[in-house]
Image: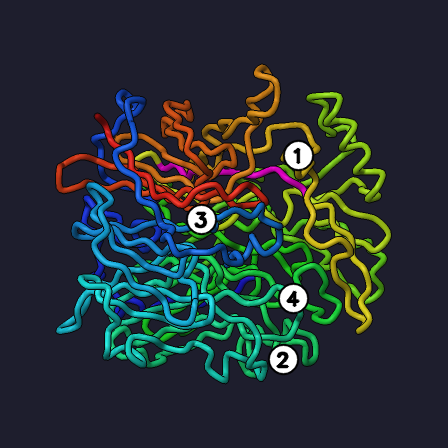
Amino acid sequence: MKRTIAITTLGLLVTACTSTPVSVDWPTYHRDAGGTRFSPLDQLTPANVSKLQPAWTYHMRPQSATPAPPSSDVDEEIPIRRSRFIPSEATPLVVNGRMFVSTPYGRVVALDPDDGRELWVYELPNHDQPSTRGVEYWPGIDDAEPAIFFGTRSGKLIGLSAATGKPIASFGNGGIVDMKTPEVMNGNPRAPLGMSSPPLTYKNLIITGSRVQETPTLGAAGDVRAWDARTGQLVWTFHTVPRPGEFGHDTWEGDSWKHRSGVNVWTSLVLDAERGIVYLPVGAPAFDRWGGDRKGANLFSNSIVAVEATTGKYLWHFQTVHHDIWDLDLPSATLVDVKRNGKTIPAIAVMNKTAMLFLLNRLTGEPLYEVKEVPVPTETDIPDEKPWPTQPMPVAPPPLARLEFKMSDLADLTPEHRAFCEQLIREKNIVESRPFQPLRGDSAVASFPGSLGGIDWGGGAFDPKLGLFIVNINELASHQQLAKRPDGSWGLKDGYVYFWNHETRLPCQQPPWGSLVAVDVNTGKIAWRSTLGVSDNLPAHLQNTGRISAGGPILTASGVTFIGATDDNRIRAFDTRTGAELWSFKLPASIYGTPITYRGKSGKQFVAAVNTGGFAGSPVESDTVTAFSLP
């Protein structure tokens, strides 16, 4: 479902972005506001990247720290193997000779990016936790100083001096804004609301998504809001569940829109700064496995929504899943340029968890390649569920991950693993699946690519010279079954479960279980696909299976792609043109944020990443930020 409007007045919004990245730095979560994760640095090349070695390590955990509950959306679904460490999904920033890192130990720190030396530390009050994926840098405006902004688990928005780490007195109440305003709390003052991803800054605005509950249905709204970066005053609100009189309100049957939670931007906003448009990748409604209490297409869930950055005014949207009952959030959006017939089309690449890639004109929302409304299964034994009869699927590119399961796909790498998977199928009554097959109460549907997604918060990266969009892909089903609750609603019978042996972490279908994929946005074709990750616990000749991953890739002008992400504890470099693996290094734990690259004061190009482990039940084995450089 899509509605577009003619954007004839956007010329008035064209302005130079006040936060244009310095070429040697990594000044925002994706390096640039458009989400490309492309660096112009070229010291590290396909010819020399194999010589990379650790340059310095910083330990985030202070001696007084004790383990705390995880704060990411995904980690709440899957038990983590406890240790004295706490998991992190953070991506550091580097700006003007300082590295800024949010840690899972209730602290935000500034480091010297050449040697990891601590420059300042800010400790959050009341045992709060900063956004688990990072912070945002604001360069200041007029007489306002450069600042670091971030959200917290408890729903605070905090502003610190980038120079000193001290709270900015003029921002909110002594540097802190309470984002739990009555309107957004929906009459549920105790409902969870916080931030797991960094905000985005534009001119004098801080634009925020949110982290809200997955269940129950009623709770805080997932609205996107903008705040004055100097004062903390609320400037605009975009209702992700349309109110009466707003476009899209009629996609919620009856009063099902009221007090609805979910429908939030829990990953990263992206911005076309030249045109003054911010793009909202909106997630699924609560509860996201059952929609009997919210019949309809349910806008703006699972949609990319374009709004005016200065006002929050709706411009257009494109919905990638109608009436989501599979937890197929839309966590990935990247601005790209598509070259066709001698012209350059400003576009946006968006992906939901199915790993279907939609390439859209970012001014109008129109698909650049054909998208069909394809009939999908609607059979279910849940009496009050009404699945949507069609779903949008792009003709090009093809889906990047498998979308169905047949018993003939069952893994047989070792007799022991095959026997485990056969037993699991019998015990849980797991059945085959087709794309978008509804869940049931009498059996467990092996839905691919599962609620961890073919892609998750990592998303992709774009090389403007080669026209390649590169993204890491998971292949792990969720074999989920519904059960009726006492109040008449439906929930998950066995909670969040995955189609694998959780001890050996070996999925139950044939590999590959993880890939790195490059798509040529100018043709809509897959340019290359490489296996991403190894299974160290399999015999040597079977280890090249690919692995489950979270976090994303980064690209450089010299043609090198860097990525951590996999649960085998490696960071890797690939040839951007061909997909050939060039280098890998095994760390104490896995990287579940995204690496960064920057030039230090010494002139060296560094690659750095946070590595803690802790995603999808992987061990939490470290607390380090590790930087690499050439000898």
SS under mark 3:
strand
Q: Residue furthest top?
A: 541
Dot placed on the residue nearer the N-terminal end, 4 or 2: 4
SS under mark 4:
loop
SS under mark 1:
strand
- Disc 3 designates what residue? 349
Could you tell me the amino acid type at mark 2? Lys
Q: Quick check: can you spot residue 561?
A: yes
Q: Residue at x 80, y 32 (%)?
A: 422
Q: Residue at x 36, y 37 (%)?
A: 467
x then y, percent, for residue 63: 37, 52
Left or right: 18 as drawn, with respect to 370: left
x then y, percent, for residue 368: 46, 48
Q: Are marks 4 and 3 in contact (CB under 8 Å)?
A: no
Q: Residue at x 49, y 27 (%)?
A: 530
- Disc 4 designates what residue? 215
Viewer-nearest of discs 2 and 3: 2
Q: Nearer the viewer, residue 596 or 588?
A: 588
Q: Quick check: can you spot residue 346?
A: no
Write the start and end of the magenta stretch as one range.
467-477
- Disc 1 designates what residue? 507
Q: CA distance from mark 2 to mark 1?
A: 40 Å
Q: Are marks 4 and 2 in contact (CB under 8 Å)?
A: no
Viewer-nearest of discs 4 and 3: 4
Q: Are marks 4 and 1 in contact (CB under 8 Å)?
A: no
Left or right: 198 as drawn, with respect to 190: left
Dot placed on the residue nearer the N-terminal end, 2 or 1: 2
Q: CA distance from mark 4 to mark 3?
A: 29 Å
SS under mark 2:
loop
Question: What label sits on residue 258 in the rendered view?
Answer: 2
Q: Nearer the viewer, residue 459 or 253?
A: 459
